[in-house]
């Protein structure tokens, strides 16, 4: 055979010569199993997101936010509480081996080892099985993590003083207190401010702002006590008592 002669081109019948336009597939062949991404699937996603967003907005309108008073860095008695998804770490830091001089162990080492084990579980157990019973290592890590988080969260909620927490963060009325008044000096002299606060905002005792009692009832409480407040704490004269009652009755919120 001479060079350049007798060469033939053979076409492959599997490759169509006619090019068809790139049109979406007819999904009516698979009813209920698949659908076009645009607009069918995306429209459903938008509808679900809209329903969730509207429901969430309705909940925020229906329920008042659990706000507390303005943060006071000088209040060393305030005990902060994290959100629910960090309560297990909050409880962990209460134990002896994870707090105080061992705070780094509870804050970094133990959580780092736990989350590191969860991250390494898929790489350690690389079996093709999907059933949890066939993957004991990954399943064991996950169950241990869930059990630990559940237990620590429950312990944190069960042993927290929720009433004291509500009182320490309670929003109270504020008033312009005349600290030069004789009534304020009588409160200070009789150690009333240690329980009712230097701004009468309340501490161990109730606030003395906007007291919903008559002057006679205020005098009765001072003399005879009420609830946790004992009677007979005021050591002044009857005239000084009247001035103290008048001062408390005059304190109103702004």
Image (cartoon, rainbow, N blue to C red):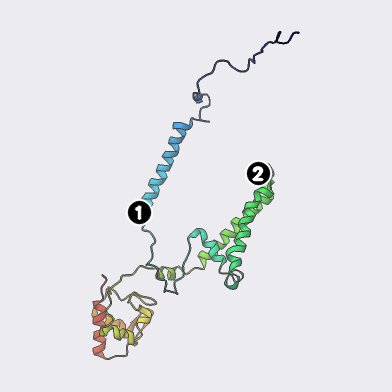
Q: Mark number for residue 153? A: none
The residue carrying mark 1 is: 62
Determine whether 218 is above or below 145 in the image: below
Number of on-image labels: 2
Circle 1: is it few (<14), some (14-19), or many (20+) Cα within 10 Å? few
At 38% across and 59% down in the image, what residue appears?
Answer: 65
Q: Residue furthest right?
A: 1
- Contact (CB < 8 A) between labels 2 and 1? no
Q: Position of residue 68 (x, y in %)?
A: 38, 65
Rendering quarter of residue 76: bottom left
Q: Could you say which is closer to the camera, residue 113 or residue 224? A: 113
- Residue visible at 35% across and 67% down? 171
Q: Is residue 101 left or right of residue 22?
A: right
Q: Return the residue at label 2.
A: 131
Label 2 to label 1, Cα distance in Å? Answer: 43 Å
Q: Is residue 174 above or below residue 117?
A: below
| Rendered view: 79 above or below 241 | above
* Residue 128 found in image quarter: top right
Give how far across and how far down residue 40 sits, in percent.
45, 32
Residue 48 shown left or right of residue 133 in the figure: left
The kind of secondary structure element at disc 2 is: loop
**Which residue is depicted at the point 26% across and 85% down?**
182
What element does badge 1 sit on?
Answer: helix
């Amino acid at each position: 055979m001479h060079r350049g002669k007798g060469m033939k081109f053979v076409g492959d019948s599997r490759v169509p010569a006619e090019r068809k336009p790139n049109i979406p597939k007819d999904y009516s062949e698979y009813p209920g199993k698949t659908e076009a991404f645009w607009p069918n699937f995306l429209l459903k996603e938008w509808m679900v997101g809209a329903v969730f967003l509207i429901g969430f907005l309705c909940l925020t309108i229906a329920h008042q936010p659990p706000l507390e008073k303005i943060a006071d860095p000088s209040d060393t008695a305030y005990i902060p509480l994290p959100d629910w998804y960090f309560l297990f770490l909050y409880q962990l830091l209460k134990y002896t081996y994870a707090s105080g001089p061992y705070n780094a162990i509870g804050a970094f080492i133990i959580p780092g080892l736990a989350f590191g084990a969860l991250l390494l579980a898929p790489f350690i157990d690389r079996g093709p099985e999907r059933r949890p019973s066939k993957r004991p290592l990954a399943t064991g890590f996950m169950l241990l993590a869930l059990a630990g988080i559940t237990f620590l969260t429950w312990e944190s909620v069960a042993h927290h003083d929720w009433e004291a927490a509500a009182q320490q963060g309670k929003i109270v009325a504020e008033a312009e207190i005349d600290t030069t008044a004789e009534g304020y000096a009588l409160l200070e002299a009789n150690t009333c401010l240690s329980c009712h606060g230097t701004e009468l905002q309340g501490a161990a005792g109730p606030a003395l702002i906007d007291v919903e009692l008559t002057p006679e009832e205020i005098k009765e409480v001072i003399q005879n006590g009420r609830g946790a407040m004992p009677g007979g704490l005021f050591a002044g004269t009857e005239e000084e008592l009247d001035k103290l009652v008048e001062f408390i009755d005059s304190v109103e919120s702004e």
